[in-house]
Amino acid sequence: MTNENFVKTCVEGFVGVVELDRPKALNSLTHSMVRDIDDALIAWSDDSSIRAVLIRSSSDRAFCAGGDVRGVRETDMAGDFKAGDEFFEDEYAMNLRMAQYDKPIVALLEGVVMGGGFGISAHGSHRVITPRTMGAMPEAAIGFVPDVGMSHVLNHLPVDGAIGLFIGCTGWRLSPADMLFTGLGNVLVSDAESFGHALCESSVDEAQERFSVSRSSLENPDSELEQNATWIIDTFGTGHWQDIEARISATEPQDDRQAEFLDKVRVMLRAANPASLVAMTELFRRNAETDIATALKNELAVGNALRREPNFAEGVRAVLVDKDRESSFDPADASKIDPQLYAKLLV
């Protein structure tokens, strides 16, 4: 247990357990929480008695709503960009360790999982979801981009990488069916707590055999992403953001269902920072062709650049501080932003 009591670690059977316990902040990750998780991973990696790692939340309301960007904004606005730089460097080092870990990492994604919450789950072997799971990568609305390695992960799902870019650009709220369709969730259970207990008492495979259920058991087993996959791939599959934006504007809905879907997409995109959309498209295109380590370096470079633009502080203010959702981004028109501004940062 840390002195903040936000991360609890223990060993149950042959499983190293990380429990996030910051429920009032939906388990948003502070710098010390990142270090505590990473320290546990390092210790267990060389412990032959530990066969797997389990990451869970103390609350069924949220697994993890992301990194503590409110805290980063505060230090940035005070002129201490180094503090934010170091937070992201350490967080991404932890993400890389997870991606390269040689033992199963099982995450129980009960409730909300966003941003950095995917960073401590999507790199693992088992992303266990329930009918109450809701996922999103909402960074564009706060003047940032999907990070924690997700610009790489979203390019290498069982579905086309264009769907990953769509998820990032829109901040799409992923239903359990969406999570299963994309592969962001690869195990569905009705009771995450029972699954976790079974894992610690037996094995990952046995817990999965006992408690996994089929997608058809969901109240709504239909994935809206799956239903609209062809349009998403055709629209987001190539080009810079300005090309994608033009295709969206030119789309005429084929039926009422698609009209409703397009209305949601356009509302989400209006809430996004145009510079984030331009930068994200360049980042995703490049990281489709890189390994995870290079992808994280590219995310750090683009993220550090965006944090030094006023739009990051403004986006976090509107979404997480004042919560008025009235962001004033500048420029407000993506056509005024040169993609090369961000492409040149990438390796």
Image (spheres, rainbow, N blue to C red):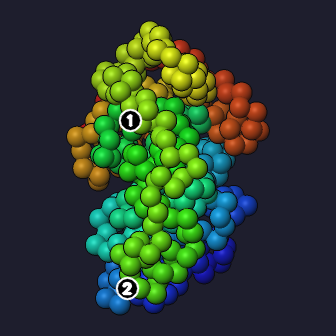
- What's the residue type where badge 1 is placed? Ile
Across and down, in percent, residue 321 comes to 73, 42
- What's the residue type where badge 2 is placed? Ile
Residue 163: numbered disc: 1
Of 93 and 74, which appears nearest the observer? 93
**Circle 2 crowding by C-alpha within 10 Å: few under 14, some 14–19, many from 20:** some
Of 62 and 261, which appears nearest the observer? 261
Location of the N terminus by quadrant is bottom right
Across and down, in percent, residue 113 comes to 55, 54
Tell me if I can see residue 26 in this picture.
yes
Residue 316 shown left or right of residue 280 in the figure: right
User: Compared with residue 181, is residue 129 higher up or lower down, i.e. above or below?
Assistant: below
User: Compared with residue 335, is residue 54 higher up or lower down, i.e. above or below?
Assistant: below
Q: Nearer the viewer, mark 1 or mark 2?
A: 1
Residue in the image at 57% along x and 69% along y: 191
User: Considering the numbered disc 2 on the image, is that residue within a helix, a strand or a loop?
Assistant: loop
Residue in the image at 65% along x and 48% along y: 70
Tell me if I can see residue 307 in this picture.
no
Across and down, in percent, residue 293 comes to 29, 53
Which residue is under mark 2? 50
Location of the C terminus by quadrant is top left
